[in-house]
Image (cartoon, helix red, strand yellow):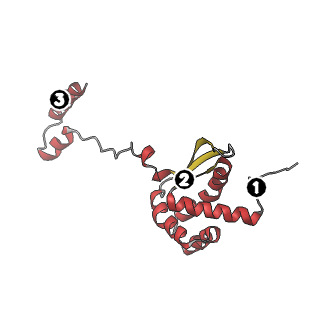
Amino acid sequence: MRHGKKFNHLSRQKGHRRAMLANMACSLIEHKRINTTVAKAKALKQFVEPLVTKSKEDTTHNRRTVFSYLRDKYAVTELFREVAAKVGDRPGGYTRIIKLGNRLGDNADMAMIELVDFNELYNGGKKEVKKATTRRGKAKKAEGTTPEAPAAETSENTEVTE
C-alpha cells in the first residue's frame, strides 16, 4: 500500500522521470502544444506551471532556478521572453489538457497539452472591446451645450438601437 502518494511516478525511476518531464517541458515551451498520454500530460502540468509562474519575474535567481529544472538555455530564454510576456496578467492555469481519444497501437488515453494564451482558436473570438462612445460626450466637449440637449439626443439614440 502506498500511503501519501503525492504524484504519479509514471513507472519510472526518479532520474528518468525528471529527464522525461524536462524534455517534455522544453518541447511544450518551444512548440506551444504537444501530444502525449493523459497521465504524462497531468504530470507535465504540475511540473511546468510553477516554472511559468517563476518566469513572470525576470531575475537572475529565477532564471537559474528554472534552468536547473529544464537544463536547456534556449527553452529558458523562450520562456522568459515570449511566454512570460503573454501570461503576465494571468494568475495561474497556464496550460490546458484536451483529451484526444485512444492510441491505435496500445489503446492508451491520449491528450494534447498546450499553453492557454497561445491558442488562437479559443482566444481568437475575443477582440479588443472598444469603450462605448456616446454623442453626449463629444457634444459636451466640442460645443459646451446645456445638459438638456444631449439627454434628448441620447434618448433618440436608444430608440434607434432598440
Secondary structure category for the residue under label 2: loop
Q: CA distance from mark 3 to mark 1?
A: 70 Å
Q: CA distance from mark 2 to mark 3?
A: 48 Å
Residue that badge 1 annotates: 9
Q: Is residue 26 left or right of residue 143?
A: right
Numbered circle sitting on residue 159 = none
Task: Tell me the residue at 64%/71% (across/down).
Answer: 68
Secondary structure category for the residue under label 1: loop
| Residue 52, percent from left and from top | 56, 60
Secondary structure category for the residue under label 3: helix
Task: Tell me the residue at 48%/56% (across/down).
Answer: 87
Task: Tell me the residue at 52%/71% (across/down).
Answer: 74
Observer-nearest of 106 and 14: 106
Query: How many discs mark residues in the rendered view?
Result: 3
Q: Is residue 141 left or right of residue 87?
A: left
| Residue 121, percent from left and from top | 43, 45
Quadrant of the snapshot with the C terminus:
top left
Q: Is residue 126 left or right of residue 132?
A: right
Looking at the picture, which amino acid does disc 3 mark?
Ala
Q: Which is more N-terminal, label 1 or label 3?
A: 1
Residue that badge 2 annotates: 94
Q: Nearer the viewer, mark 2 or mark 3?
A: 2
Q: Crowdedness of circle 1 by 10 Å Cα count: few (<14), some, many (20+)? A: few
Looking at the picture, which amino acid does disc 2 mark?
Tyr
Looking at the picture, which amino acid does disc 1 mark?
His
Residue that badge 3 annotates: 152
